[in-house]
Amino acid sequence: MSEPDWPARGRSWWSHVQALANDGMEGRETGSAAYRRAADYVAHQFQEAGLEPGGVQGYLQPVDFRVVQLDEAASSMGLVRNGAVEPLRLRDDAQITVTTATVPDIEADAVFVGYGLDIPEIGYSDLKGLDLRGKFAVYFRGGPSEIPGPLKAHFQSLEQRWGSLHRAGAVGSITLINPKVPDLPWSRLGSGLLFPRMELREQSPDEPRPLQFSAFFNPERFDKLLAGTGHTAAEIMAGLGGPGPIPRFPLAVRVRGHAVVRHSTASCWNVAGVLRGSDPALRNEYVVGTAHLDHLGIGEPVNGDRIYNGAMDNASGVATLIEIARRMKESGQRPKRSILFLAVTAEEKGLLGSEYFAKHPSVQGRFVADLNMDMFLPLYPMKYIEVQGLDESSLGPELRELAHQSGIETHGDYEPQRMLFVRSDQYNFIKVGAPSLMLSVGYVKGSPEEETSKAWFLKRYHAPSDDLDQPVDTVAAAQFTDLLGRFMVQVANDRTAPTWNADSFFRRFAR
Ligand SMILES: [Zn+2]
């Protein structure tokens, strides 16, 4: 068989990125008219690729949201010490994160709780022995080096944090991010929190509610919170990510917050298409391919540009789903299990579209695997594939072997502190029992490609410059797409469904 025409396939892939990430798509904000146009495009492409509708209204599955938006100009925060109020500059010192539970006014004592982690099964607790009743808990994201990554990541999810902080009696939270961990820089995190925040309209009553008041704090201003405690930011931050807990102690300031919040509702859609399996005994088992379709919409201008196009995040992943479906139609392949192509909404709002789908699936059957893409970053040639969840299930070695046959080597997560395995849509499938992977184009540590990847995060991640005017290796995208498509077919044809490893933390969710 001759080598595929990679440049042509790359152009075809890019055409979908263009269709979804051009300025007319206005950044595909959840609930916007522009998002609906993007969803219609994907539905049309799924139809052209011969997929069965897998939604409720054809390919679309409606999802309803409650929306809260901070009126920043009317809101404020301050630190109160010895009766004097030091106002905080929003966006600069701190930023309020609103939820449907946010109260208009609060003033309370605050306690620095280290990482704020509470992991009963290994007997680790940063909260134990501290009086948090009616107080703010101030914590750094992350955790001690000796706690396994997946465990640390799971217990940092908002629902776990809200649960343990509620049980400890805390009313508010202030989150700091370790600046040594490559992630969203404060400048974009602070202003990014001004995007509307959403929650699923249907909440099960057993889910922990948000706290009364939450904020992020600029780690460079951490000393403001520590004033009067005898501790310094430098001292505490030096221990971040190292072995053992970091110090925990009451702060000498009270935290005051005033939040003006506008409430509304929104509706949006997941887009689902099914390649029906050929085996009557297995066709109700689904191998799921996911990518989020939403991005941030229109927001704070950067260099005069207000449109957050989200070309890599994550029009790229949706384009790959479309291309895989098209190739399957062309090849006439009919794997034994069904393959579900799912473009989800509201990932940027907290993985809400995939949460809704996993809890209220619009297809009948069982999800045996989820293979997710979220910014798979085809910025350099496809020699390596990076896999989140590589060592957790039978999917890891199976993909490694298939990639190896194509001359592509596999590596795991180089930045486990970023917790990517629980920060994108696969997590909601993991929680309903499906072994899952998240896949990106990989690189070797210390290589120029690593620099390219890091520079991309610094410059373009969640910025308006993640647009169509950036260097992308479309041949790498086509080769990544080809590998993922072949892997989906292989898993759909496997004699047995994928299983979690015996020692995997995530096995607890298996059904
Ligand atoms: Zn994303």
Image (cartoon, rainbow, N blue to C red):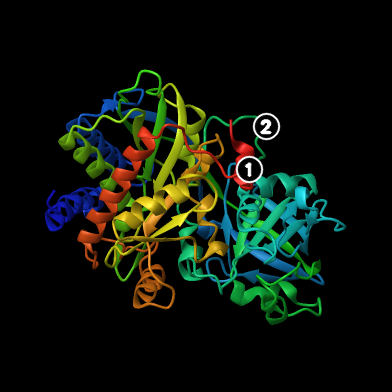
Label 2 lies in ligand 1 vicinity (Cβ under 8 Å): no
Q: Choose between 382 and 462: the one closer to the eye.
A: 382
Q: Choose between 259 and 475: the one closer to the eye.
A: 475
Contact (CB < 8 A) between labels 1 and 2?
no
The quadrant in which the C terminus is found is: top right
**Which type of secondary structure does the marked residue at label 1 adopt?**
loop
Residue 208 at x, y = what percent? 67, 39
| Residue kind at label 1, given as amino acid type | Ala
**Residue 26 is at least partly visible in this image:** no
Q: Choose between 8 and 133: the one closer to the eye.
A: 8
337 in relation to 460, above or below = above
165 in relation to 300, above or below = above
**Which type of secondary structure does the marked residue at label 2 adopt?**
loop
Q: Choose between 143 and 38: the one closer to the eye.
A: 143
Task: Answer with left or right where residue 189 lies relative to residue 111.
Answer: left
The residue drawn where x is 59% and y is 35% is: 510
Which image quarter: residue 406? bottom left
**Disc 1 to disc 2, how far (Cα)?**
16 Å
Mark 1 or mark 2: whose residue is earlier in sequence: 1
Task: Answer with left or right where residue 41 lies relative to residue 71.
Answer: left
44 in relation to 158, above or below = above
Residue 265 at x, y = what percent? 46, 35
Q: How many marks?
A: 2
- Label 1 crowd (10 A; few <14 / some 14-19 / many >=20): few
Q: Which residue is denoted by mark 2 in the rendering?
A: 206
Q: Which residue is denoted by mark 1 in the rendering?
A: 101
| Residue kind at label 2, given as amino acid type | Asp
99 in relation to 36, above or below = below
Which image quarter: residue 147? bottom right
**Residue 280 is at least partly visible in this image:** yes
The residue drawn where x is 68% and y is 81% is: 234
